[in-house]
Image (cartoon, rainbow, N blue to C red):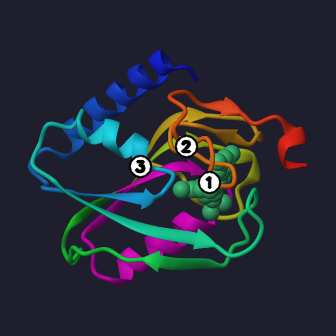
């Protein structure tokens, strides 16, 4: 996905979210670090009153694979009780991270919790999770750029590309 394709799709998502969230004063929650670039572009295309916050979640274990044991490394600073939340993710893979977060926000008394993910890799899903807003569905390849890393590198690439297998195998 080149810069132009990303820009166009983020605009489209922004328009839909703007229409759906007008009057709801949502809390947009970016999941660090991967969603940082997407979040920054997306919220500038949603010209309605909102609050933003971030949290950091990670799964124990190997880098290129999610383990299912999710750990919250840094929590929100906004009280989400009775709020409409939109979780902003870079990519849904197994779905373990989102499952954990959705359960958590529901138990904290959020009024509504939805998910916007730039990418969706449905082949590897372990949880029955469907994001409400999806930028692009992609095949089972490891991708980097536009916020997504491999070993903390490549996040600053302005496009998204498939990482060559010989780099991580
Ligand atoms: P899940 O819990 O859905 O398996 O994993 C979600 C997280 O795994 C993503 O937020 C992302 O950090 C990481 N991840 C999954 N697939 C990829 C990928 O293709 N590239 C990168 N860079 N990270 C990925
Ligand atoms: Mg992520
Ligand atoms: Mg990562």
Foreground of the two, 1 or 23 = 1
Residue 152: mark in rendering: 1
Gap between marks 3 and 2 measured at Cα: 9 Å
- Residue 89 lies in magenta, yes or no? yes
Residue 141, compared with residue 63, is above or below; it is: above
Q: Is residue 62 magenta?
A: no
Residue 155: which disc? 2
Image coordinates of residue 167 in percent, x first then y, are 84, 42
**Chain part drawn in magenta:** 87-114
Q: Quadrant of residue 76?
A: bottom left
- In the picture as drawn, the residue positioned furthest to the top comes out as 4
Q: Is residue 49 above or below residue 102?
A: above
- Most foreground residue, 20 or 91: 91
Name which residue lies at 55% across and 20% down: 2
Q: Are marks 2 and 1 in contact (CB under 8 Å)?
A: yes
In the visual, does 88 lie left or right of 155? left
Image x and y of residue 102, in percent: 45, 70
Between disc 3 and disc 2, whose residue precedes?
3
Point out the image quarter for the N terminus: top right
Q: Secondary structure at mark 2?
A: loop
Residue 36, disc: 3
Badge 2: residue crowd in 10 Å (few <14, some 14–19, many ≥20):
many
The Cα atoms of the two marked residues, 1 and 3, are separated by 13 Å
Is residue 95 in view? no
The residue shown at (57%, 48%) is 91
Are the residues tagged 3 and 2 within 8 Å (C-beta)?
yes
């Amino acid at each position: 996905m080149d810069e132009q394709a990303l820009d166009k799709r983020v605009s489209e998502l922004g328009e839909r979210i703007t229409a759906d969230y007008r009057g709801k004063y949502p809390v947009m929650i970016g999941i660090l670090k991967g969603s940082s670039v997407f979040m920054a572009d997306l919220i500038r295309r949603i010209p309605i009153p909102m609050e933003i916050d971030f949290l950091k979640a990670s799964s124990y274990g190997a880098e290129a694979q999610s383990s299912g044991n999710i750990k919250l490394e840094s929590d929100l600073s906004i009280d989400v009780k009775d709020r409409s939340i939109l979780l902003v993710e870079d990519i849904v893979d197994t779905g373990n991270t989102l499952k954990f977060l959705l359960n958590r926000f529901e138990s904290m008394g959020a009024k509504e919790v939805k998910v916007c993910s730039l990418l969706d890799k449905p082949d590897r899903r372990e949880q029955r999770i469907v994001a409400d807003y999806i930028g692009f569905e992609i095949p089972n390849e490891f991708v980097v750029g536009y916020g997504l890393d491999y070993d903390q590198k490549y996040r600053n690439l302005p496009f998204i590309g498939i990482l060559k297998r010989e780099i991580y195998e």
